[in-house]
Amino acid sequence: MIQSKKDYLAYLEADRIALGKKKLTYKRSLIQLVFPDYIWKFQRLLREFEYYKNTKKDFLSKIYLLILRIRFRKLSLKLGFSIPINVFGPGLSIVHYGTIVINGNTKIGANCRIHASTNIGASNGSSKAPQIGDNVYIAPGVIIFGDITIPNNTLISANSTVNKSFTEENTMIAGSPAKFIKFIDVKNIIKHLN
């Protein structure tokens, strides 16, 4: 969770690397005006919102936080994302536009790569949501729900339904309900980890 300006800048840089974005130059800024990258814009706005929500308490910051909340909500609706703040660790990579719904009690570690049509939430009215480790690849159409944990270095295959905890790291899980498929090296899938 972002607790300082240093954390904020580190999260932004990790997200930029995860998305494969080059550093912003004057020329790239002009290109962004004509051809905006809405996912990168969303992720930058997400991190700025987290920073102001977690660290700023003065009156002017609260006014700016309200503006951020409105901009964040508007862009979330445009892209189909229902992603609360303070859920993802650094290195987030949202791959495509499309529906992504995440419960606010979910915690996801660093270097998560997440695709469209993903739903992560609680079950049976519980407030307990999934706790997901670092370096996790979540393919399109995945549903993860309940009071469960997913370990580090896990690949969750497309259209899987994960409703139980897994403990082994460096694995691929798939199916509905999900089960262990094989051991893998997630660095072959999340390329920026190399």
Image: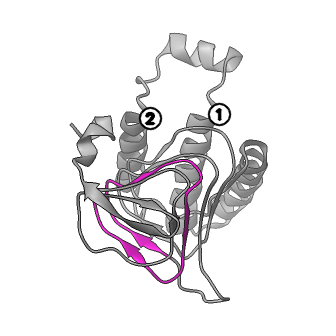
Q: How far is the residue under mark 1 from the one under mark 2?
A: 12 Å
Picture quadrant where residue 166 is located: bottom left
Give the total of numbered labels: 2
Tell me, for residue 19, which label it has, or none.
Answer: 2
Instruction: Kindly report the secondary structure that dominates the magenta region of the rendered protein.
Output: loop
Residue holding disc 1: 38
Asked if residue 16 is positioned above or below residue 32 in the image, the reply reads below
On the image, the x and y values in percent for residue 134 come to 32, 59
Magenta stretch in the rendered image: 130-153
Asked if residue 27 is positioned above or below residue 29 in the image, the reply reads above
Q: Count neighbours of disc 2 (C-alpha within 10 A) and say few if under 14, some if 14 to 19, many if 20 or more.
A: some
Q: Count neighbours of disc 1 (C-alpha within 10 A) and say few if under 14, some if 14 to 19, many if 20 or more.
A: some
Amino acid type at circle 1 is: Tyr
Residue shown at the point (44%, 27%) measured from the top left: 21
Q: Are marks 1 and 2 in contact (CB under 8 Å)?
A: no
Residue shown at the point (47%, 23%) measured from the top left: 24
On the image, the x and y values in percent for residue 49 come to 59, 56
First reached walking from the N terminus: tag 1 or tag 2: 2
On the image, the x and y values in percent for residue 122 come to 59, 79
Label 2 element class: helix
Amino acid type at circle 2 is: Leu
Residue shown at the point (59%, 73%) measured from the top left: 121
In the image, residue 150 lies in the stretch drawn in magenta = yes
Q: Which quadrant would the N terminus be assigned to in this image? A: bottom left
Tell me if 140 is positioned left or right of 17 in this view. right
Residue in the foreground of this view, choosing between 140 and 44 = 140
On the image, the x and y values in percent for residue 25 come to 46, 17
Residue shown at the point (67%, 18%) measured from the top left: 35
